Image (spheres, rainbow, N blue to C red):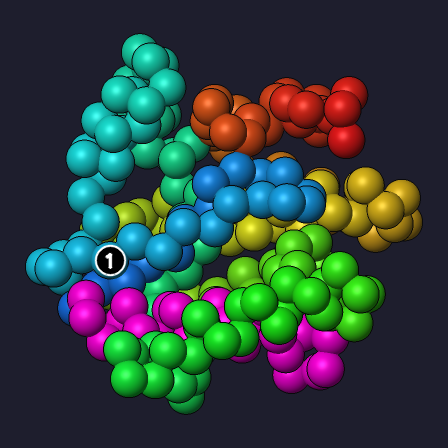
Amino acid sequence: MDAALSGLRAEFAIIANTMAQVFPELTLWRGDLYPERSILALVGRNDAAPLDPGTLAAQWRAMTGDASPDAVLSDRALKFYAGNAASGLFAEAPVNTDDRPLIEYLAPRTHRAVIAGRARWLTGAQRDRLYAELLSALPPEEDPYLAQLTPVQRDLVRAGAVYAQWRGLRAANDPQAPAEWQTFLSLTPPHARNPDSPAGQVARGGMAFGDAVE
């Protein structure tokens, strides 16, 4: 881990590993598909169990109001799954406790370092690197949380990471962006290219909700 990543990335790992000590299952979900200032949720459950595509579809319908069939909704939602703490990616991080409140001490220092330009938030390329490391440490085919998914559905998990990467490359006018977009299309059937999330939306044709205000 380089010096620029040590602050926010280390603090995120502390929070993730602390939650993993409490919850038998800890998964990570993207709250949107924006290139910067995006949301990453840590979701802990008391009872570890594989993801049920039908339940995911029902939750997505309740959140978006989309009346599409369950198979369509679950496929759209799967692009927001980022990974599983069972990957072990955070296992070496310290644990935050009442008598050792690391985050309470580290967070103000990191905030000042970001303001001073000595550190960066865990966004953009750094966030995309985290997504890639999560999938590399525990590929969708081996993730117990995704055990009930089909191979096509597991590809949609990869597609979400690819789309987030594409948004960042596109925003930076990187020449690799078109190739990344083609990878996204190859992993994603047409019915799943628009997740229709209230927070971040993939639209047809390679445009995204919020493009005009980036």
Residue 199 picture location, percent across and down: 50, 29
Quadrant in which the C terminus is drawn = top right
Quadrant in which the N terminus is drawn = bottom right
Magenta highlight on residue 15: yes
Nearest to the observer: residue 53 or residue 18: 18
For disc 1, the neighbor class at 10 Å (few under 14, some 14 to 19, many from 20) is some
For the stretch drawn in magenta, the main secondary structure is helix
Nearest to the observer: residue 178 or residue 35: 35
Q: Is residue 86 left or right of residue 92?
A: left
Q: Is residue 202 left or right of residue 176?
A: left
Reply above or below: 27 against 70. Answer: below
Residue at point 27%, 78% (across, down): 98
Q: Tell me which amino acid carries mark 1.
A: Gly
- Helix, strand or loop status at disc 1: strand
Which stretch appears magenta? 1-23
Residue at point 72%, 69% (across, down): 113
Q: Is residue 37 visible?
A: yes
Examine the image and state in which quarter residue 124 appears: bottom right
Residue 121 picture location, percent across and down: 66, 60
Residue at point 51%, 45% (across, down): 39
Reply above or below: 81 against 201. Answer: below
Residue 151 picture location, percent across and down: 37, 51
Examine the image and state in which quarter residue 90 appears: bottom left
Reply above or below: 58 against 167. Answer: above
Magenta highlight on residue 213: no
Q: Which residue is mark 1?
A: 44
